[in-house]
Image (cartoon, grey):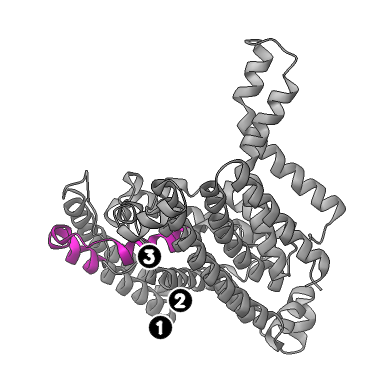
């Protein structure tokens, strides 16, 4: 890294220390943990865009798959729901798989005059059997104590296992989607991935037997201690007393620090793997395909196959970040996945940091999330300074103060414009 790059990271640390000093160290560590998760998301997008030039507008769909994995791994199984409709769900999924396989066989084996009618017949019968079994099973599951459960639950395993599972589930979804959409041109690929992301999020939001839908799944297990357990532990109370600190605030700070250590470890591993891949012959081949896919294809490179690899890897990283996000929150909130809003935010992270450079993506993720959180207090301070000469209760002053929180959207747009004008390759450009 150059001295300029080190200066950028050092400046971020200084501003974060300023938040801890002026506001709260709990606030500073909360922002830092989300910065690390945002950096991992930006790293996943950079693998797709920076390495191969793939424009994925469906990032939040794969983040949501990672969040779903956290529920399926760590939530306690609901035995009553499994008894009521678990076999029905499994049976309907088997029927769906057999129907898809039968359609593929009919498409390959049946002669053209009868192929279309065969596909229609198999599809109709499969849908009829699937829908009959599925709807009954879903109704039975969702009727089991819907205020608290109403879903199948998970495996009851440690939630940290879901981080790897989130990457695998997102990678599996990326393989299926990539096989369909990676033959499309760049703009059509963006539209296709955005649409598929909306489908994934809609399934997570409305299939209550799977995720409780808008009722949310709460109370997920933690890989770190609980604050209430810490404040009841003798060694911790003695430590807080020796430091003259509030035990409750110190417990919250220790929990956030534990998350910080875990998240930093995951980011370090992913950065090491990404740097190794970028500097390898595979990485040079991917950049050659990105810069001139026709020339790379003429030299015998499987462009579509390599694009599929990169698409899967980037989505897997986003899936890991999604599982980590649900772990930090301790709950799955399907309504919080806003594809257009947060996809734009992640792309700003990659553009600001510098696409094609892994360190730039990490820096962009940290800076943008820091500004996204701090834009609200900064906006209130700016509006208060601007409207200071106006009388209290004046309509313009009241209007500006009420909408001060929206300055974060103006700030993101302004940052994007300034970066594209004065640093189009980002703060840490690709070398």
| 3D distance between C-alphas at marks 3 and 1 | 52 Å
Question: Does the CB distance between marks 3 and 1 fall below 8 Å?
Answer: no
Q: Residue, x 38% and y 54% (percent of image)? A: 330
Image depth: mark 3 or mark 1 in front: 3
* The image quarter in which residue 365 lies: bottom right
**Residue at image mark 2:** 112
Secondary structure type for disc 1? helix
Q: CA–CA distance between discs 2 and 3?
A: 57 Å
Task: Please provide the residue range marked out in magenta.
Answer: 64-92
Tag 1 or tag 3, which sits nearer the N-term? 1
Circle 2 crowding by C-alpha within 10 Å: few under 14, some 14–19, many from 20: few
Asked whether residue 273 is drawn in magenta, I would say no
Q: Residues within 10 Å of mark 1 (few under 14, many from 20)?
A: few
Q: Secondary structure at mark 3?
A: loop
Q: Is residue 211 visible?
A: yes
Name the residue: 67% across, 78% down. 275
Quarter that holds the N terminus: bottom right
Residue 246, position as x, y percentages in the image? 43, 45
Labels 2 and 3: the sequence-earlier one: 2
Along the viewing direction, whichever of 313 and 358 lies nearer the viewer: 358
Q: Are marks 2 and 1 in contact (CB under 8 Å)?
A: no
């Amino acid at each position: 890294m150059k001295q300029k790059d080190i200066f950028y990271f050092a400046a971020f640390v200084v501003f974060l220390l300023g938040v801890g000093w002026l506001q709260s160290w709990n606030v500073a560590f909360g922002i830092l943990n989300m910065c690390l998760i945002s950096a991992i998301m930006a790293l996943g997008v950079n693998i797709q865009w920076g390495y191969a030039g793939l424009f994925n507008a469906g990032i939040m769909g794969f983040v949501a798959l990672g969040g779903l994995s956290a529920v399926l791994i760590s939530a306690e199984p609901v035995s009553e729901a499994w008894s009521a409709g678990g076999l029905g769900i499994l049976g309907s999924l088997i029927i769906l798989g057999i129907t898809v396989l039968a359609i593929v066989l009919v498409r390959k084996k049946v002669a053209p005059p009868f192929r279309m009618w065969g596909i229609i017949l198999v599809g109709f019968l499969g849908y009829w059997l699937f829908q009959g079994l599925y709807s009954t099973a879903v109704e039975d599951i969702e009727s089991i104590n819907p205020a608290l459960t109403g879903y199948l639950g998970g495996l009851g395993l440690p939630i940290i296992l879901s981080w790897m599972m989130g990457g695998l589930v997102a990678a599996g979804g990326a393989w299926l989607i990539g096989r369909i959409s990676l033959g499309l041109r760049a703009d059509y690929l963006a539209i296709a991935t955005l649409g598929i992301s909306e489908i994934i999020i809609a399934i997570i939001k409305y299939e209550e037997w799977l995720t409780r839908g808008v009722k949310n799944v709460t109370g997920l297990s933690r890989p770190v201690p609980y604050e209430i357990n810490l404040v009841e532990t003798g060694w911790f109370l003695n430590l807080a007393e020796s430091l003259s600190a509030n035990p409750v605030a110190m417990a919250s700070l220790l929990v956030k620090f534990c998350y910080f250590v875990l998240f930093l470890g995951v980011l370090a591993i992913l950065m090491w793997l990404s740097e190794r891949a970028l500097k390898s012959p595979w990485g040079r081949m991917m950049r050659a395909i990105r810069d001139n896919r026709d020339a790379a294809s003429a030299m015998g490179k499987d462009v579509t196959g390599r694009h599929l690899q990169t698409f899967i890897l980037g989505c897997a990283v986003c899936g890991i970040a999604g599982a980590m996000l649900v772990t930090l929150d301790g709950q799955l909130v399907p309504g919080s996945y806003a594809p257009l809003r947060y996809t734009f935010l992640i792309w700003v992270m990659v553009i600001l940091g510098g696409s094609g450079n892994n360190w730039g993506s990490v820096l962009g993720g940290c800076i943008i999330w820091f500004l996204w959180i701090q834009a609200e207090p900064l906006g209130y301070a700016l509006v208060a300074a601007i409207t200071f000469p106006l009388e209290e209760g004046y309509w313009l002053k009241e209007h500006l103060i009420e909408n001060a929180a929206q300055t974060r959207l103006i700030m993101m747009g302004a940052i994007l414009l300034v970066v594209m004008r004065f640093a189009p390759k980002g703060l840490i450009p690709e070398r």
